[in-house]
Image (cartoon, rainbow, N blue to C red):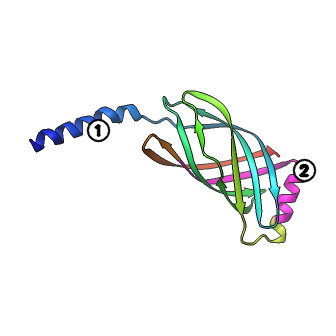
């Protein structure tokens, strides 16, 4: 009797695992980045990202931790403030709201940030982990991105 239950369990896993085939989400482009708050201890920004979700299901973005560099100068780590729902089989622009609290900002880091804001253009490099959720399943996705963008 136990053996039949075990076989049924294995068959269910095999049956349902085909339903959860995953295709990579792609970043099409960074539309814009808006700095909504800037102080010596904190930066808040909104990044409008155009993403393609080729999967047959919505994906909930639960957490994001990203190391960010401007013009090859590391300025800190960004954390996602809002949860997002990436629509299935679609290409849409989503507004990611980030904040970053700094322990110490030295003068050179502040100069890089102010220069980027003043010139409205900068080279940005982002590396970190995005945690997404599909129903009860969650997965971590590494991200690495480098591009010249407008602020």
Q: Is residue 138 above or below residue 102?
A: above
Picture quarter containing residue 25?
A: top right
On-image quarter of the N terminus: top left
Picture quarter containing residue 70?
A: bottom right
Residue 7 point in image, percent of width and height: 17, 38
Q: Is residue 112 above or below residue 105?
A: above
Residue 96: numbered disc: none
Disc 1/disc 2 C-alpha distance (Å):
54 Å
Label 1: few (<14), some (14–19) or many (≥20) C-alpha neighbours in 10 Å: few
Q: Which residue is mark 2?
A: 119
* Horizontal relation, residue 136 to residue 35: left or right: left
Q: Residue at x 88, y 57 (%)?
A: 115
Residue 33 point in image, percent of width and height: 78, 45
Q: Secondary structure at mark 1?
A: helix
Q: Which residue is mark 1?
A: 13
Query: Mark 1 or mark 2: which comes first in sequence?
Result: 1
Q: Residue at x 45, y 40 (%)?
A: 135
The residue lying furthest to the left in this view is 1
Q: Which residues are magenta?
A: 110-131
């Amino acid at each position: 009797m136990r053996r039949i239950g075990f076989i049924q369990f294995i068959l269910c896993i095999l049956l349902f695992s085909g339903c959860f085939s995953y295709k990579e989400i792609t970043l099409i482009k960074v539309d814009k980045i808006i700095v909504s708050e800037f102080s010596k201890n904190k930066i808040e920004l909104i990044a409008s990202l155009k993403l393609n979700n080729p999967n047959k299901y919505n994906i909930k973005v639960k957490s994001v931790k990203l190391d960010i560099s401007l013009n090859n100068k590391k300025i800190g780590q960004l954390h996602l403030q809002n949860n997002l729902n990436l629509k299935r089989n679609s290409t849409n622009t989503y507004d990611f709201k980030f904040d970053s609290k700094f322990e110490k900002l030295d003068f050179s880091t502040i100069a890089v940030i102010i220069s980027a804001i003043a010139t409205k253009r900068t080279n940005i490099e982002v590396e970190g982990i995005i945690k997404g959720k599909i129903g009860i399943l969650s997965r971590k996705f590494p991200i690495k991105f480098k591009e010249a963008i407008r602020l």
